[in-house]
Image (cartoon, rainbow, N blue to C red):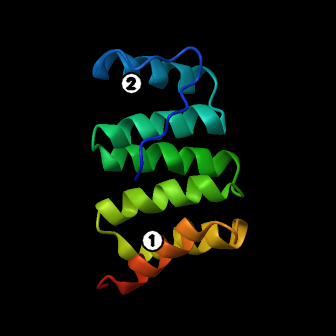
């Protein structure tokens, strides 16, 4: 997963624990897709893939049609070696935004992994 350069105005990457703690508090107060995605990306940066997946689960539950969020969760599932789940999420991301070649590449990779 590439690192994402967007950071909401109230969240600065000044320290691992404090940054995640602030993002967790922000997501609790305002569980918007953007806040939950940012929290998931911060967990990803820390290689806390299960926590990242959980944040993306919540983002998807609040708006189930965001191809980018399915893609991010699929990347977590790849790291967690949950390849069938990754394939489902990558398929959903391709259906949602067929113009994104990167989504197709990740789907192909996930399909090649053993069950």
Chain-order first, disc 1 or disc 2? 2
SS for dot 2: helix
Taking 39 as reference, is 59 above or below it? Answer: below
Relative placement, left or right, of 115 versus 58 is left
**Residue 72: x percent and y percent?**
49, 54
SS for dot 1: helix
Relative placement, left or right, of 39 versus 10 is left
Q: Circle 2: is it few (<14), some (14-19), or many (20+) Cα within 10 Å? A: many
Q: Residue at x 46, y 81 (%)?
A: 108
Q: Which residue is mark 1?
A: 85
Q: Residue at x 44, y 69 (%)?
A: 86
The CA span between labels 1 and 2 is 26 Å
**Residue 45: x percent and y percent?**
33, 39
Q: Residue at x 45, y 16 (%)?
A: 12
**Residue 27: x percent and y percent?**
55, 27
Q: Residue at x 32, y 82 (%)?
A: 113
Taking 2 as reference, is 34 above or below it? Answer: above
Q: Which disc is residue 20 wearing?
A: 2
**Residue 97: x percent and y percent?**
70, 66
| Image quarter of the C terminus | bottom left
Q: Circle 1: is it few (<14), some (14-19), or many (20+) Cα within 10 Å? A: some
């Amino acid at each position: 997963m590439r690192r994402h350069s967007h950071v909401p105005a109230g969240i600065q990457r000044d320290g691992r624990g404090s940054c995640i703690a602030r993002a967790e508090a922000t997501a609790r107060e305002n569980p918007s897709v953007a806040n939950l995605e940012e929290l998931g990306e911060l967990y990803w940066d820390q290689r806390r893939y299960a926590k990242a997946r959980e944040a993306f689960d919540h983002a998807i539950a609040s708006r189930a049609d965001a191809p980018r969020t399915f893609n991010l969760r699929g990347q977590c599932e790849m790291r967690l070696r949950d390849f069938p789940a990754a394939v489902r999420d990558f398929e959903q991301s391709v259906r949602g935004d067929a113009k994104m070649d990167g989504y197709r590449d990740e789907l192909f990779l996930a399909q090649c992994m053993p069950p």
